[in-house]
Image (cartoon, rainbow, N blue to C red):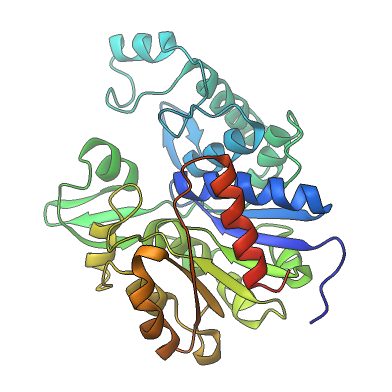
Amino acid sequence: MTARTPPRVVLLAGGVGGSTFAVGLRDELRARGGELTVVCNTGDDLWLSGLRLQPDVDSMLYALAGVKDRTRGWGRADDSRRVSDELRAWRVGWDWFELGDLDLGAHIARTSWLREGKTPSEAVARLQSRWDLRATLLPMTDAEVDTHVVVEAGRMHFQEWWTRHRASLEPVRFENPGVEASVPAPGVLEAIAAADAILLAPSNPIVSIGPVVAVPGLGDAVREASAPVVGVSPIIGDAPVRGMADVCLRVAGVPCTAAGVAGHYGARSNGGLLDTWLVAEEDAAAAAEVEALGVHARVEPLWMADAARTRALAVAALAAAGL
């Protein structure tokens, strides 16, 4: 296909790695006059203390707005905890799930709009209108398809398993109740159809990207798109860059390797998602295995240690898509 000038790019993402990559990608596209649309995982969403939380959406929002807490990788910078402390004193909510006052402000605003009858997409649009993100942020769906973790003793919300238990409870499987009846959020399919490139962020393949492509019609839109699809490996040196993705991969029967995740996504030529897969220099030996899957492999520096290297990774991903 012939790329437009400026290019239009869609990024499927979630989590800290996804939001970090999105900033570098946005900055590079901005320099080219391009357009970025981020389709964000909402499987992390939950109701807590009467409020609707969207952790991945908010991490993406704060990162693109330049107000993210860089030390923790999530939440607002320079936030306080007075409201969380007060809720803890009242024994309301989860005392191990700490939310900052500024962060709570976003949750209160979102919940207020939802109570007024606005859709999650409309609430996300209002939230991002506060800042000039130079990108468009879309939730994967307006339906509630929160991620649940099934363990031997029962089930729990993903956030409890991930944040409270730090993935120490061996999961049997991950589920997204209601995903079968969900539909892509307004604008998602249109953005994919109009894209010059579709990128899969270096996010958790099971609980960040998995729910996104599980929305009926969304994964198929990526598979059938005219634009090339390029993924960035979240695995470097046979280990996840951040978080406990290795546990999630193990439960899904996926090797915690760059080639293993590429195989999980699959080649578009064989009904999968990928045309090209960026693997780290530390995993260069896996390139041949990736190529054998029918996915083109490119070896690149994948560590997003600072803004310059993150933007360089975005340049590499765009180059892999022919942009």
Please name whichever residue, 301 or 205, is drawn nearer the observer in this view of the structure. 301
Q: Quadrant of the C terminus?
A: bottom right
Q: Note whether 60 is above or below 223 in the view shown.
A: above
**Total numbered labels placed on residues in the image:** 0
In the picture, residue 32 is in which quadrant? bottom right
Residue 279 placement (x, y as % from top left)? 44, 68
Residue 28 placement (x, y as % from top left)? 71, 50
* Residue found 36% across the figure and 61% down from its top: 235
Q: Is residue 141 visible?
A: no
In the picture, residue 208 is in which quadrant? bottom left
* Residue found 32% across the figure and 55% down from its top: 240
Q: Is residue 71 visible?
A: yes
Please name whichever residue, 205 or 213, is drawn nearer the observer in this view of the structure. 205
Q: Note whether 45 is above or below 74 in the view shown.
A: below
Residue 36 placement (x, y as % from top left)? 72, 54
Please name whichever residue, 87 or 137, is drawn nearer the observer in this view of the structure. 137
* Horizontal relation, residue 23 to residue 79: left or right: right
* Residue found 34% across the figure and 76% down from its top: 285
